[in-house]
Amino acid sequence: MLRLPKFEVKNPATAEEAVAMILEIEGDARFIAGGTDLNPNMKHGLFAPERVIALNGIGELQGIRLDEDGSMRIGAMATLAEVTKHAELNQFYPALCQAAKLVSGPQLRNMGTLGGNVMLDTRCQWYNQTYFWRKSLGYCMKKDGSKCHVVEGGSKCVAAASNDTAPALMTLNAELEFVTTEGRARLPIADLWQADGIWNKKLPHTALLVAIHLPKPAANSHGAYGKLRDRGSVDFPLFGIAARLNFGSDGTIEDAALCAVALQARPWPLKKAASLLIGTHPGKDDFNDAVEKVANLAAKQCRPMPNIPGDHEYRHLMVPVFTRRTLHAAASDEGPVHHV
Amino acid sequence: MAARDQHGAEAPWDQGFRVVGKENRKVDGLSKATGEAIYTDDIQLPGMLHAKMLRSPHPHARVLSVDTSKAEALPGVVGVLVGAELPVRYGVIPWTPDETALAVDKVRFIGDEVAAVAAVDEDTANEALDLIEVEYEVLDAILDPEQALVTPEPPIHEDRKRRDNISKHVELEFGDVAAQVEDADVVIEGDYTFHSTTHAAIEPHCAVAQPNSDGRITLWSSTQITHYVHRALARVLELDPARIRVIQPCLGGGFGGKSDPFSLEFVVAQLALKTGRPVKMLWTREEVFYAHRGRHPMKMHYRTTAKADGTITGVDAKLLIDGGSYSSFGLVTTYYSGQLLTGPYAFPNYRFDSTRVFTNRPPNGPKRGHGSVQPRFAFEIQLDEVAEQLSIDPIEIRRRNFLGEHTETVNGQRVTSNGFMQCLEEVEKASDWRERRGKLPFGRGLGVAGSMYISGTNYPVYPNKMPQAGVQLKIDRSGLVTVFTGGNDIGQGSNSMVAYLVAEELGIKVEHVKVVAADTDLCPVDLGAYSSRVTFMVGNAAIDGARKLRKQIVEAVAKNWEVEPRDVRLMDGTVVDLSAEARSMTHVEAFHLAEEMFDTLGSTGAYNTPTLGGDYRGGTIGSSPAYSFTAHVADVEVDTETGRITVNKVWVAHDCGRALNPMIVRGQMEGSTYMGAAEVSLESHHLNRFGLHAGPSLLDYRIPTSVDTPELEALIVESIDPEGPFGAKEAGEGPLHSTIPAIANAVFDAVGIRLRHLPFTPAKVLAALRAKEEQA
């Protein structure tokens, strides 16, 4: 069995205390939510924190509630299983629930949290491997080395954002509430990401995500998530795409959002493509025609790389297929788009 | 074959079977379900050290020096071992000993073992590995079998007679295949690929060694072949085998992946001797992927000739087998790749030309359906193509070529019982084949395939005339019968089979039989769990031993009652008098009478195969006392936009001779079919461009989850074999074979494409669909 490194565990009662604990030591320290990502990563020697700060004793990180202004507040420690089963979330934010339900398998959704999925480390077939494995190849730039095995001679890490819920939250214009040493701040999720596979977030890992806020949904909002993977469970996405469609009172599309994942370091919003849907009528030819255009444009904008396992050329072929299917699923309140 | 080896297929008492054929619980079922069962890694001994292995980061290199001084100086390190300390070569096949416990001169794949450390705990041992300095001279690596064929230099193994990278070459011809081509109405010729897959048993390999103060050593190991490990340990450790005890604790799955002696077994034993303390090594999942011994990748070319009525006239095969870095069972694999194709269909002319090469890849070995799953895949697709060209129903063409029972194959293998026709009938009926095949909407289809497999092999890996299986029975005054067997229960249920057979023969309840297995100090030799041999051979030995005791018990009771022995019947632990007088006693009382009459009660039983096989070099390899037969029908759906194949359902009919426990037989049939279906499009033991396993974990090696598993329906066919234990044959490996071609043939029915190169990834399916569209 692979061994965990030795570390001390802290159990803060408040978010502020947690942030103080992560900053007070010189060596590396990490927050642990469900542990479904951090534990295997530590066993692979990707992280060797001296201190691990458990977040399960912090009250404000728990629970899912409807706020007075009609927005939803999801505590960062709400498990993926809770999100999946939540009635209002299913009603108003179907893409999020569908994405959450397709993360890994049932046991890991019981442990894994929405906050953890948002903050998930990027993934790469040359990185998510054991110490021996990585050492055999002289490591890579994301950890312990300087080379890139995905793009030979490449100077920027292209490990892939692999969090299913991120694109769904992007289409829903979620806001993320963080506690840092500076205090408490809310950040639109679109502003979180940067194009660096080594650390794809603009905030450092010492910033604590406490809650995900979803703005009050439009009256007639629809959504879906599509996920390509080899198996019907467990696997990370080989490609993922979330869609939101707001229907006007006459049934035309008033607003649309699309976002893909498992491509490069950031979740990949497809704004221009989504805009082609506005003014079309789901169920009618103009919508179907627009969907084809969107699918073709998505294929141009999404260029899977050989960063995660599998055939990247095949993943590229699936971009228009999953884009089209996910849009149709969103328009007809079906979904998720997934092979089982 | 001695008289002891045949017992008849009928129930031993005239009331019919009381145990056999019933769905009895496995003898170890409850202990496994409750966690009480002891696996190798559960063993903790006082003062025990933990050992770790240093592995090669290069696919091919000379080891110039190994400096362990810094590791030895690390506090907590108790012992360090390098290859020079265990230089004796070994190999499971005695003719090809090309492995050493740790690298002596060269490393031959990424992950090859170089040195080992024993320390007070795992973390210290891991830390010490990083302190060992190895100087390598990196050599050119050969990763492709085609390249190995044409590249004699550098030889991966240097001190063989032949200076090339060919591990084994076998060419055999029966009849004249070339002559058939001209007269044939149909000739089907094509190339096929079987990729690399591994066993993925849930329990990783583990071994614990304990040195004893009297100079003896005990090894507990997660092995399928205690006896061969015992022999190999004695050879490599250069110890008297009488001083070595090998025990296989409860085992968490083998599938062929634990049927070689492995480096960790020698290493823990030597470290235990060196340090004087017990030593354990548990491999990580990653290490299990490197140890591998998985299914041999094969590149295959087949040509089948047939007459207009569908009769096959000849089969010509040329196979290139990727052996990986060591010989392992490769000699047998090379023969099996040709020898096991000659049923369930008769064809009068057959040739195979099989070449196994060495490459710098993790060594290949036996995986469930050793050596014969790959050729079966290719041939059953060819047969489907013959049927298609001749417009014959694919099930019908298989019937027309039926080999028959109590006959001989073209390569001289004796075949006894053969229930293949009934297998075809069962799957045809259950799948509603006649109404559905060829009539389903585009995108959905049915496919069929058939196969045969051995029930044990006539060929013990080292030549000897002693029995292939032995048991010893001991009777206690409590009424408990203990059976000692060298057979390895690896989860397939062989200990349960022994218990059922002894209970049946003695007329007692299963709970009064205890099986002690796979302990070389206590149990008579059995050759181990491979080639689907245990139920057949140990089963026959168990009946043999029990029958001797039964005779004594009956005689003692008959004398006591003053009746004829034929009037004494044992049934479910009660002895009854069949003569006029109605009286009975318990089996315990009967045992006491027998002990009074014959002194302490005990017996031995043994089994050896009859002399079998063709009269030519290699003719005994692939010969078996009985063959099992299988037919599969698969129902698939193909998403023509994504290329994904969904297997909705597989019907599997299997002729297991007699189902000693139908529940366990169905379990084996479902497990085999699941494993075959997994190899179609999900599982791939893939190396990256550096020769390093691309994803040695259960996340990246995609074994199917429950939602990826097709619905399975197991249909048992009982042909009642004249030589099997009460008529039984194997059920653990045969039902894998035809799963894969049945799915391939179903894809053809669904969307009209012939897939010939595994794995059938969605990308390949899409490419084939595009190619078909372009043709049209």
Image (cartoon, coloured by chain):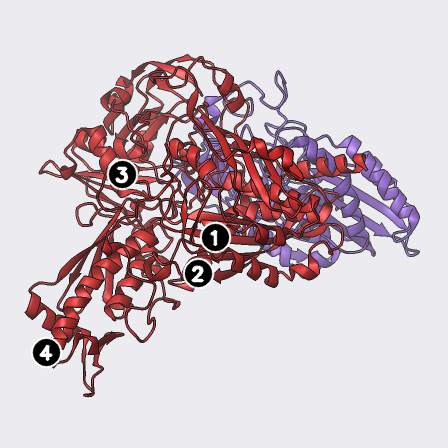
Q: Is residue B356 above or below residue B674?
A: above
Q: Please state which of residues A16 and B260 is positioned toward the viewer in this rendering.
A: B260
Secondary element at tag 2 = loop
| Chain identity of mark 2 | B
Q: Please indicate whether residue B424 sits to the left or right of residue A286 in the image.
A: left
Spatial distance from mark 4 to mark 2, Cα to Cα?
A: 40 Å
User: How packed is label 3: few (under 14 Cα within 10 Å), some, or many (20 or more)?
Assistant: many
Kind of residue sitting beneath label 2: Ser
Mark closest to the chain's N terminus, 1 or 2: 1
Circle 3 chain: B
User: Which is nearer the N-term, disc 3 or disc 4?
Assistant: 3
Q: CA distance from mark 3 to mark 4?
A: 46 Å
Q: Find chain B in the image and tell me its colour.
A: red
Secondary structure at numbered mark 1: strand
Q: In the rendered structure, which disc, 4 or 2, sits on the residue that comes first in sequence? A: 4
The residue that mark 2 highlights is B719
Other residues around mark 4 within 10 Å, as few (<14) / some (14–19) / many (≥20): few
A226 sits left or right of B29 in the view? right
Front label number (4 vs 2):
2
Camera-nearest residue between B571 and B306: B306
Q: Colour of chain A?
A: purple
Where is B181 relative to B550, above or below? above
Mark 3 against mark 4, which lies toward the viewer?
4
